[in-house]
Amino acid sequence: MDEAITTFNCTLCDRPFTHVGNSDEHIVPNSIGGRRKIRSFICVNCNSRTGETWDAEIWRQFCHVALMHGVERERGDVPAVPVKTASGRQLKLLPNGNLTPQRISFEKVPNPQGQGFRISAAVRTMDEAEKMVKSMAAKYPELDVQEVLSQVQSNSEFLDSPLTFGVGFGGPLGGRSMVKTAVAMALNAGVRPSACDRALPYLLSENEDPPYGLFYLRDLVSPRPAGYTPQIVSVRGDSSSGYLWGYVEYFGLARIVVPLSDRYEGEAFSSTYAFNPANGKELDIRVDLSFSDEEIERIKMNEAYTDEQYSAVANSSFGIVYFRSVRRQYKKAFEGAAEYAASKLGISYGEAIPPAQATKFAEYMMEKLGPLFVHMSANGIPIMEAMRIDEAD
């Protein structure tokens, strides 16, 4: 392995950094929680180009899972993404895991009690409610804005139809992003990008076949967290076999092995960057990149998995993501119920509850939480699992 290496040209366009500008490149894309960066890897222009194409595809492929799991970016806000239920209802999945209508609804109907009319509207935020009421007041001056806003209520409802979305990864854009991540990690460990001679052509030419293979024959990660799905990139150099290996895993679902080189002559080494995407905290995780001859052949042919092995991994990983989403929703509902109960009793949210009012406080809490518990029970969601707070952020 090279020591204290310095690169002078961009890995992708081969132009000198002195002419095109150096850049801080996230090893794992910022969009899915990556924080660690590497310099002297790609230039400013290539950073921008691959970020808007390759890395943007990674977000497109994993955005639904990311918002259900919870992801915190080092830079920029996490956007809401559109989702659809099996019955065709259009919603938005928010960064906090909640769902909201994609569009506000507005209905003007005759007043059944006589003169005038009644307006029924559903908005997503109080800001939207205020803008709508003020707009109406401009047309109907007799409307009392403050009185209308005082009657606005926050309501929770539960889906009567499941969300539908697919998760696929790789492809010409996403695959190149993941291979770029492996090459960047190799540079972070002290290996020149030019030494990644089996992977680099794929990044430089649109006509090259993918050098990586899916890997689900066995779990390469130890210890594997139980309460969240980490992002992982690992590299290992072994001069005795000549292999320089890369491994990239996102949300437990996408797991690829990249033969970066089969002519590696440097020192033996292993380096891993793993973190919880919900908070960016780095993890002490070991990735076993020692492969048998049979496994190597299956990796090269992209046959290092069976449908049953992939399904087992997908079900396990998505199960973790799903229950994280459930716990986040319960946590928010619990906080909302506590705030409601406190307001009904005239005490400040977070203030100690007077013993004489404890029973009433619990009743007000259940007034809000009761429908949630009924919904969870009817849909087979373990309530005690939802109430867990360990590793739920």
Image (cartoon, helix red, strand yellow):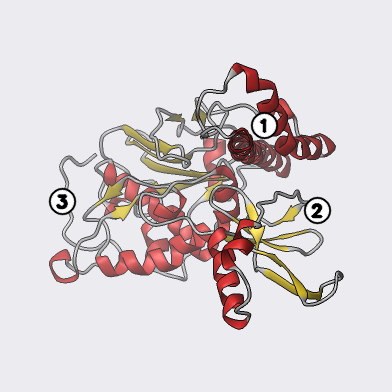
Residue count near mark 2 (Cα–Cα under 10 Å), binned few <14, some 14–19, many ≥20:
few
Q: Residues under labels 3 and 2: Cα distance?
A: 55 Å
Q: Who is closer to the viewer here, 160 or 132?
A: 132
Q: Which residue is mark 3?
A: 6
Q: Earlier in the sequence, mark 1 or mark 2?
A: 2
Residue count near mark 3 (Cα–Cα under 10 Å), binned few <14, some 14–19, many ≥20:
few
Q: Which residue is mark 1?
A: 386
Residue at the spot 77% in from the left edge and 51% down from the top edge:
159
Q: Is residue 201 left or right of residue 324?
A: left
Residue 58 coordinates in the image, percent (x, y): 50, 58
Residue type at mark 3 is Thr
Where is residue 236, by image quadrant? Answer: top left
- Determine the secondary structure under disc 3: loop
* Residue 324 position (above or below residue 62): above
Residue at the spot 41% in from the left edge and 69% down from the top edge:
205
Residue 327 coordinates in the image, percent (x, y): 62, 35
Quadrant for the N terminus in the image: top left
Residue type at mark 2 is Ser
Q: Residue furthest top?
A: 355
Residue 345 coordinates in the image, percent (x, y): 62, 32
Residue 137 coordinates in the image, percent (x, y): 59, 76
* Residue 353 position (above or below residue 213): above
Which mark, by number, is residue 161?
2
Where is residue 63, by image quadrant? Answer: bottom right
